[in-house]
Amino acid sequence: MRVLVINNDGGGFADYVDVAEGTTVAQLFEQQVGSTEPNRYLIRVNRQPCPAHQVLREGDRVSITPTKIEGA
Amino acid sequence: MLFLRDYGDTEVGGFGIAPSDDLLFVEDIQLVKQVCSWVHVAFDDESIADFFDREVDANRRPEQFARIWIHTHPGDCPRPSITDEETFQRAFGRADWALMFILAREGQSYTRLRFNVGPGAEIELPVCVDYSRSFLASRPDAWEAEYLTNVHAVQPVPSESAEWEPVRPSPLEEDPTNSWFESWFDYAADDENAEELLP
């Protein structure tokens, strides 16, 4: 199945990717980011915050965006 | 950016929007919801995600809208603070490249481009306003609405105000530039009527 992934890491990405049925948000994050620090990101599915174990569905929109952007 | 900087007494920040064929040419600045004091600005995480969604819906790629981090500083020092450096590393350090632009209230600016791939590299860049390109008319009403929608001013916390001292000397050992103000004069140097166009 295909899901839309938005991710600014690396070269940046905003496109559909094929994932296996039953893939969870945590698994997709590991595939796309590979970071051991998911707490550095806000991960949303269809513009809503989601639990790590949420199973993705066809056509879902997953955004992985930076958090705690602050200047002084 | 000058309008946004001068509209209120606080710092303000946003993302630079660039065309796909010239990623260092900022053609627009987009604010996200943020809490600001005169020495601090913090973006709202949900608003950042909303911003990413809107920009993707507008058919922009992340490198066009998520790599140029812009914010202002009080006074005349645009050099990055400890907080700035931490954010630049933590929030932008996994992208292939990113740029930090700081505009001080008295006009000086600081720009640093960082490449995070390969051996990595950082370089300070000069900044100018490119008057040779076409641009839309000023939209102060829209800018004001965007500012009022997104910027929530609060009183500074004493512990925060101690953080803003610059910590990173310029590798070029040059003073921060205000050349982007002066670029208009360079561009108009051959135009006899240039002075008449100035406010």
Image (cartoon, coloured by chain):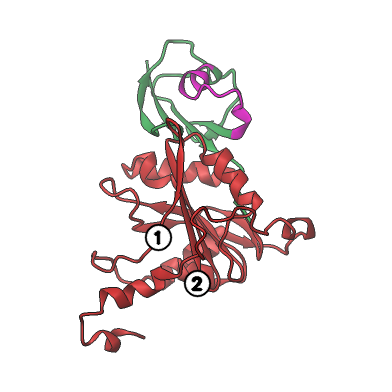
Chain colours: A green, B red
User: Which disc, if any, is residue B1?
Assistant: none
Local crowd size for mark 1, using a 10 Å CA cut-off: few (<14), some (14–19), many (≥20): some
**Image quarter in which the N terminus of chain B is found:** bottom left
* Quadrant position of residue B53: top left
Res. B151 visible in picture: yes
Res. B114 visible in picture: no
Residue A41 place in picture, x, y as percent? 57, 33
Local crowd size for mark 2, using a 10 Å CA cut-off: few (<14), some (14–19), many (≥20): many
B55 is within the stretch colored magenta: no
User: In the rendered structure, the residue with mark 2 lies on which chain?
Assistant: B
Q: CA distance from mark 1 to mark 2?
A: 14 Å
Indicate the amino acid at tag 1. Pro
Residue B149 place in picture, x, y as percent? 53, 60
Give the side of residue B192 with respect to residue B159, left or right. Answer: left
Q: On screen, B79 above or below A14?
A: below
Q: Which residue is mark 2?
A: B107
Q: On screen, B8 above or below B96?
A: below
Q: On screen, A4 above or below B166?
A: above
Q: Which residue is mark 1?
A: B126
* Principal secondary structure, stretch drawn in magenta: helix
In terms of depth relative to the viewer, which is nearer, A47 or B18?
Answer: B18
In terms of depth relative to the viewer, which is nearer, B85 or B156?
Answer: B85
Which residue appears at 45% of the width and 70% of the height? B178
Which residue occupies the extreme top position in the image? A21
Indicate the amino acid at tag 2. Gly
In terms of depth relative to the viewer, which is nearer, B165 or A29?
Answer: B165
User: In the rendered structure, the residue with mark 1 lies on which chain?
Assistant: B
* Quadrant position of residue B161: bottom right
Which residue appears at 40% of the width and 60% of the height? B126
A37 is within the stretch colored magenta: yes
Q: Which range of residues does the magenta coloring cover?
A: A27-40
**Image quarter in which the C terminus of chain B is found:** bottom left
